[in-house]
Amino acid sequence: MLEVKRSQCVDVFFKVEADAHIVSTIGTVELVVSACRFENALRRHCPTCCVPYIDTRLDCSLPRPRDSALFMPGHFGGTWGIVRDGMAANWVSQPSDCDVFNNGFLTRYADPSGCWNGLQYTGSMMQKAINCESYDDLCQPYDFSDFEADHGGPHMWISGHMAALPCAPLDPIFWSHHSFVDMLGERLKARLAPQQWRYPSNWMVPYMHRAGDPMRPFHYRNADGMYDEFIGKNYFYEISPADFKCSKDTDCSPSGLLWCDTASGTGACKAKCQPRGRCRTGVHAMCYCKKGTPRCNMGTCEC
Ligand SMILES: [Cu+2]
């Protein structure tokens, strides 16, 4: 990721994305083209790397989802103010009109509330998308579908650059979040007959978002984004740990960021909480420690 940023690829991608992002679900197809190229750019520096998706359902079990171990220095880094640690530590906000906070750097102001406020994905949001009857159905109404609205949750949750939509791709979380959104589309596509996976031809589709309109700056038309081979989309998604039963922590994650909660009888993978984050007293297994013994004492994780 750092190499991609150093090569100024992130800034270039950010420019490409700014347009696609601020408009309707149909912008999804352009995001797919960008995400695909972004992953290819990453692979030029690390041939075995891929862009991981973030499934925010896993963070929902935390009293304060922003305490997720995902935001520790070894991963995405801090969630309050200038990002000073993690993979995007001290990333400069470029171009200059993306210096939204007048501090020169990538910035986050993550919401401190619980999952109840709807900023993370829930099972029902996912089902709503996956149970659509066609791609057209997923996109309706074209100016602001539920799919679009629900995808806005993680943008607002992380906030800072992520909530300044034309500049959101500056944050690497953007790519992982949008990979998840793309995965929802893939899950729907897998359920549908091929004729249900067509770019909407309805006259109500907004100007510049119609099937034949150019997908700038790529040499594609918007409708081309529906055809994986045509756009060179060659990746697939692993099943999310939120979608299978576990019996031990290592079933959920090789990186140790997740734990397997077996309290209810069926094991469910959940995000771990970082040190000093809020946890449920006595549920020691939910705390993440790189070294030492995880403890949840009086509602706070310690190592
Ligand atoms: Cu977005």
Image (tube, grey):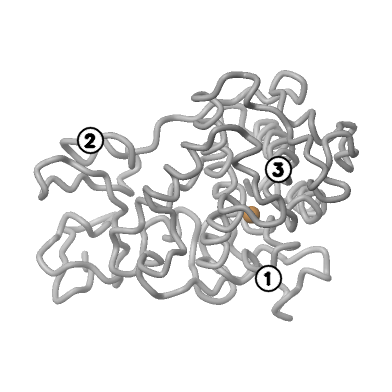
Residue placed most toward the observer, 279 or 1: 279
The tag earlier along the polypeptide, 1 or 3, is 3
Q: Residue reaching furthest front?
A: 203
Identify the residue at image location x=58%, y=60%. 152
Q: Secondary structure at mark 2?
A: loop
Is ligand 1 less than 8 Å from the beta carbon at label 1? no
Task: Tell me the residue at 68%/39% (across/down).
Answer: 35
> Residue 96: x and y, percent?
83, 70
Q: Could you tell which of marks 3 and 2 lies nearer the N-terminus?
A: 3
Foreground: disc 1 or disc 2: 2
| Secondary element at image label 3 | helix
User: Of label 1 and label 2, which has the lower sequence position?
Assistant: 1
User: Which residue is under mark 2?
Assistant: 245
Q: Position of residue 159 (x, y in %)?
A: 57, 69
59 sits left or right of 38 in the view: left
Q: Are marks 1 and 3 in contact (CB under 8 Å)?
A: no
Question: Which quadrant of the figure shows ligand 1?
Answer: bottom right
Cα separation between marks 3 and 2: 31 Å
* Amino acid on which disc 3 is placed: Leu
Q: Quadrant of residue 245?
A: top left
For disc 2, the neighbor class at 10 Å (few under 14, some 14 to 19, many from 20) is: some
Is the residue indicated by label 3 positioned so its CB lies within 8 Å of ligand 1? yes
The residue that disc 1 covers is: 105
Say if 10 sits above or below 189 in the image: below
For the residue labelled by badge 1, is the local secondary structure a helix, a strand or a loop?
A: loop
Q: Which residue is mark 3?
A: 31
